[in-house]
Amino acid sequence: MMFKKLVLATALLSTFAAYAEEHAAEANPLTFNVGAVSEYRYRGLSQSAVKPALQGGADFELGHGAYVGTWLSSINWIHDADPKGQAKGPVEMDIYGGFKGALTDAVAYDIGLLEYYYPSNTLNTVPGAVNANTLEAYLALTASNFTAKISDSTTNLFGTVNSKGSTYLDLSYAADLGEGLSLVPHYGNQLVAHNSSVSYSDFSLALNKDIGDGVVLSATALGTNFKSKNGAAYTLPQTGGKDLGSTTLVLGVKKNF
């Protein structure tokens, strides 16, 4: 399974690399970003054991709507999922590529593939888990400030056994408040295939402030209904019983180059 996913990711990047070479004259500059957050939450669940995380990435616009990119973050959840505390996988590396364009004058689309790659992770050594690496296909439609995005896993989802075909619905609205401020409410619904007992919804409200020179500050209130829906908090063995899906406030800073 690992080999097949790496082949898919490699083929995707090779395709876009060839596309970039063909349209090199039309490509936009390569951009980078680095940042830090008080806690790394993804789809409402803490990936960093309720601890700060360092993050960064790079994006390359290939022209004609095509793009590729990568993004990395420090994480704890793979280690924390192992009752023995021996599983390894301290880094998440996302590799993605796709196409953006316009369906109509009012509706834009974004379609692509995203590989969540955890280098040298050993989650498959934990009883009841499989390799953490996950490949998703996604499609997003944007009308005015509203975006609806659906992601579908073509592999098992983040180490969950027999979860291929899981879907995540992401609904968000970006409100420009002026003076570099934006407000982004979000609702998400994670359906884990063949594992309905761990499916859940998440919600957030992010306030972002562009202070200039590529620096953006953020404050995001977020949480999930995991506890109320599943009758128990989302915890992992090595977190001391911390509820990784509880409502919280996450602060962040990012610098775009």
Image (tube, rainbow, N blue to C red):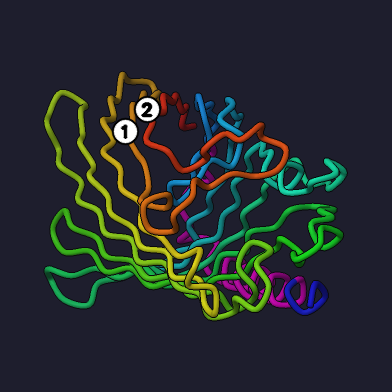
Residue 8 is left or right of residue 200, and the answer is right
- Left or right of residue 229: residue 39: right
Give yes or no for contact between labels 1 and 2 (Cβ–Cβ under 8 Å). Answer: yes
Please give the range of residues in magenta. 6-32
Q: Measuring from the top left, give residue 231's x and y in whole percent.
A: 44, 54
> Label 1 to label 2, Cα distance in Å?
4 Å
Q: Closest to the observer: 67 or 5? A: 5
- Horizontal and vertical percent position of residue 253: 44, 24
Q: Is residue 137 visible?
A: no
Q: Is residue 244 above or below residue 128?
A: above
Look at 69% across and 38% down and name the residue there.
Answer: 76
Tell me which residue sits at (44%, 58%) in the image. Answer: 230
115 and 193: which one is in front?
A: 193
Q: Quadrant of residue 58?
A: top right
Which residue occupies the foreground of this view, 88 or 206?
Answer: 88
Residue 176 in sight from this viewpoint: yes
Q: Earlier in the sequence, mark 1 or mark 2?
A: 1
Considering the numbered disc 1 on the image, is that residue within a helix, a strand or a loop? strand
Query: Magenta stretch containing residue 16, yes or no?
Result: yes
**Which image quarter is the N terminus in?**
bottom right
Which residue is under mark 1?
A: 221
Task: Give the quadrant of residue 141.
Answer: bottom left
Residue designated by label 2: 249
Q: Residues within 10 Å of mark 2 (few under 14, many from 20)?
A: some
Mark 1 is on which residue type?
Ala
